Amino acid sequence: GLRKKEVNVLCLGLDNSGKTTIINRLKPSNHSNHLGPLSGEWKHASQTQTQEIVPTIGFNIERFKSSSLSFTVFDMSGQSRYRNLWEHCYKESHAIIFVIDSGDKLRMVVAKEELDTLLNHEDIRNRKMPVLFFANKMDLRDAMSSVRVSQLLSLENIKEKPWHICASDAIKGEGLQEGLDWLHEYMK
Ligand code: GTP
Ligand code: MG
């Protein structure tokens, strides 16, 4: 058949925001509540087991397929000592998923700094690539709403790129589908 279009997605955000948990939700091997855009059409390239999620060291690469696209997702570590790795992936990436811990009020300013640095980077600045934000951990009792998170991050100032924010609970898998469907539309 036709070759699927290959797209690289960069998953960024501070440590502990839930990037790896979100990406793990996409794996078909996690049978209970398996999610996928376009009604479960994600296919993972290799066998995977349900793993305990640990802080990412450096980065992990995951591959998924939808009906029309072949995705390579770079799951970067958000720890400060590894954040300098992010920029090496900018040139090759076609979309960004930026994850925020909606319960982490103290570090929202750090998340904003990292986002601003990212958006001003020469390999990102003038490109129309879509940016999907997950205001994750919406289940936490003191979680901020996605509207509040977008205000604190000044997302309305992003003019040159299509962007979208979804509240999510990566543990239950809530909110992820909506975001991924949005992203999928921009990548086709
Ligand atoms: P680094 O790899 O260090 O950059 O972190 P990460 O962004 O990949 O975070 P990770 O997926 O490892 O999740 C960090 C912790 O948050 C884990 O204990 C997860 O179980 C937890 N977590 C992730 N998503 C949610 C969520 O939606 N709600 C709650 N309550 N906890 C979550
Ligand atoms: Mg991780």
Image (spheres, rainbow, N blue to C red):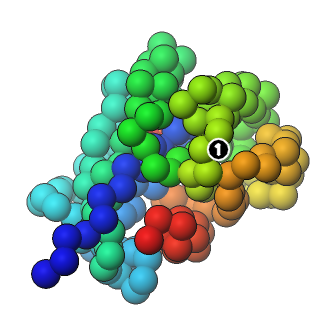
Counting the numbered discs, the total is 1
Q: Report helix, strand or loop for mark 1.
A: strand
Residue at the spot 68% in from the left edge and 57% down from the top edge: 163
Tell me the quarter of the image containing the C terminus: bottom left
Q: 94 or 96: which is nearer to us? A: 94
Q: 40 or 66: which is nearer to us? A: 66
Q: Locate residue 70, reporting x and y percent.
A: 28, 63
Note whether ligand 1 is within 8 Å of mark 1: no
Quarter residue 68 falls in: bottom left
Residue at the spot 60% in from the left edge and 26% down from the top edge: 122
Residue at the spot 64% in from the left edge and 44% down from the top edge: 100
User: Is there any visible trace of residue 133 in the rendered image?
Assistant: no
Q: Is residue 164 left or right of 147 when viewed as pictured?
A: left
Q: Which residue is mark 1?
A: 100
Tell me the quarter of the image containing the N terminus: bottom left
Q: Locate residue 51, reporting x and y percent.
A: 26, 49
In this rendering, the answer to whether 50 lies above or below 11 is below
Quarter residue 66 falls in: bottom left
Mark 1 closeness class: few <14, some 14–19, many ≥20 residues within 10 Å:
many
Q: Locate residue 46, reporting x and y percent.
A: 13, 58
Q: Amino acid at mark 1?
A: Ile
